[in-house]
Amino acid sequence: MCARVAFLHCVLAENANISDYWGEVDKLLVALRNKYSNDAAKLSKCFGRILTADHKIYGDVEMDNLLKNARSPAQEETESIVTGGVIAGAGGTLEGPEHDDEE
C-alpha cells in the first residue's frame, strides 16, 4: 500500500501542473508493465525502489501509528456495507429480500 501511495506521490511531484493526473498515472503504469514484461516480481522491486526514494526525499512515517489506525471498527463496517454486507444489528442487506423499495 505504501509503495502505491509513493508512486502516486512521485507522479504528482514530477507533474505538478498536469491537467490529467489520473491519465498520467495510467500511462506510467502501462509503461512500467511494458518495461518489466508484466512480471510481478520485477514490478514489485520497482515499486520498492520508488518507496525507498520517497522515504529518502520525504522521510519515513511511523508505521506503528498507521497500522494502529488503519482499520477502525467503523471503517470495517462501512466497507462491509458498501460491498453488500450487513449493517451491525440490522439482520439483512440493502439488496436482500427484507428490503422494500415501496415505502
Image: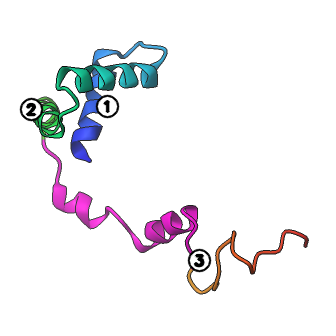
Q: CA distance from mark 1 to mark 2?
A: 16 Å
Region rendered in magenta:
60-87
Point out residue 83 in the picture as x, y percentages from the top left corner: 54, 62
Question: What residue is drawn where x is 12% and y is 34%?
Answer: 42
Q: Quadrant of residue 31?
A: top left
Badge 1 element: helix
Point out residue 2 in the picture as x, y percentages from the top left corner: 23, 45
Question: What residue is drawn where x is 13% and y is 43%?
Answer: 60
* Residue 37 as seen in the image, left or right of residue 52: right
Residue occupied by mark 2: 56
Residue occupied by mark 3: 87
Q: CA distance from mark 2 to mark 3?
A: 43 Å
Choose mark 2 or mark 3, whichever is in front.
3
How would you rate the neighbour count of disc 1 (Cα within 10 Å): few for under 14, some for 14-19, many for 20 or more? Answer: some
Q: CA distance from mark 3 to mark 1?
A: 33 Å
How would you rate the neighbour count of disc 3 (Cα within 10 Å): few for under 14, some for 14-19, many for 20 or more? Answer: some
**Is residue 64 one of those drawn in magenta?**
yes
Q: Quadrant of residue 47?
A: top left
Q: Quadrant of residue 9?
A: top left
Badge 3 element: loop
